[in-house]
Amino acid sequence: MLIERRPPGQIRDAIFSAFATSGEPLHVSAIVHSARCRLGTVAASSVRSYLRLNTPGTFRKTGLGTYALRAPEADPSEQFITARFRQTRLNRATLVHADCFDWLATRQADSIHAVVTDPPYGLVEFNEVEKQKLRAGRGGVWRLPPSFDGHKRAPLPRFTTLSDADVGELRVFFERFGRAIIRVLVPGGNVVVASNPLLQHVVTNSLAAAGLEPRGSICRQVMTMRGGDRPKNAHEEFADVSVMPRSMWEPWIVLRKPLEGRVQDNLRKWKTGGFRRPSAERPFGDVIKSAPTNSERKIAAHPSLKPQAFMRELVRAALPLGEGIILDPFAGGGSTAAAANFIGYDSIGIEADAEFYEMAVAAVPKLERLSVGEVKPVRA
């Protein structure tokens, strides 16, 4: 039988999806059937190999040909980061070179107080093939918008190119991600995730299916190069038509792990359950004005880098009492870690890509020293 070659991680995610749907031990045949329903042609040997290679670390064998997910064991060290991952300490931030799912499986339960991250919410744009195209400047999912007002534009992912299968993979990925982070979060811990107007409903529903509570969204008010174009190859014929609205904002989805008791009970015990106010007179709002990432890109040329003025507001608010650990499972160029250092929070950034990891290690000290915005460091 001819087996279609597919990007790394699809079979892995299909296996995790099968367990997430069942919640019980599964026979290999049931896992293979679930993977084929999701992906089409899948070799049973590929599923069996993945299970064998990850037993007993990730799976445990419960019977002949039957497996279950192994519950991660809590480590007694409050600040535990397993030594098998490369890591760099930068001020109060720790950057770790690892797949976030591998790292999260080692982390003690109820040990992270907030998640602030910009994940690969299109997934396709950060597979190895598309990253190579990005770095070579050869398009693919990434497009280079035209120069504007004398400025060279950064590459943008074309999310309109995602197929139904791509969106299906997105759902599996974010439900798995939600299940991984809800275990390590303390009750009431905030989860703030960058998204896209075309995909935010998919990401929100998937994270909610994992048990996180949707709490609205934050509007990053910024002019981008997305949308507003006339019909391709018919610009003159339909000169008064835009195919999509010109994007002037970026949604950041807000969720939280369910509270333990009332908000005040949760704040007293876990130091979380709300957002820190900018001042006694002003609550934290869901619209934040933001400039494009210009100064920051001179330091770190990551395609998803976010401006420090915006990130500092977001990160500061994520810990309502200014206590705890901020986690960024998709650290990229280090925006979250740099903002946390500036504010004075402890943070952990996880980055799977070796080139982006090195970029973040070099960039975080420089990004945290940028003089931007009105947010001030927290005083002890």
Image: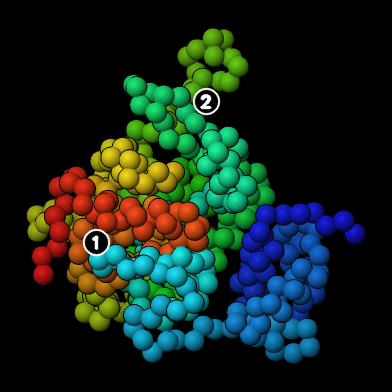
Distance from label 2 to label 1 (Cα)?
41 Å
SS at badge 2:
loop
Residue 175 drawn at (x, y percent):
54, 64
Given residues 364 and 339, the one toward you in this image is 364
- Lower position in the chain sequence, tag 2 or tag 1: 2
Q: Residues within 10 Å of mark 2 (few under 14, many from 20)?
A: few
Residue 334 appears in view = no
Q: Residue type at mark 1: give it.
A: Asn
Q: Which residue is at a point 47% across and 14% down the rendered structure image?
A: 240
Q: Which residue is at a point 20% across and 60% down the rendered structure image?
A: 343
Point out the image quarter for the C terminus: bottom left
The image's mark for residue 243 is 2
Residue 57 drawn at (x, y percent):
60, 82
SS at badge 1:
helix
Q: Residues within 10 Å of mark 1 (few under 14, many from 20)?
A: many
Q: Residue type at mark 2: give it.
A: Val
Find out whether the residues at labels 2 and 1 contact each other: C-beta distance under 8 Å: no
Front: mark 2 or 1: 1
In this rendering, the count of numbered labels is: 2
Direction from residue 306 to residue 376 in the image, left or right: left
Residue beneath label 1, please?
341
Residue 186 appears in view = yes
Given residues 303 and 89, the one toward you in this image is 89
Residue 36 drawn at (x, y percent):
77, 62
Point out the image quarter for the N terminus: bottom right
Q: Which residue is at a point 71% across and 59% down the rendered structure image?
A: 38
- In this view, the residue farthest toward the right is 1
Residue 17 drawn at (x, y percent):
63, 67
Direction from residue 279 to residue 355 in the image, left or right: right
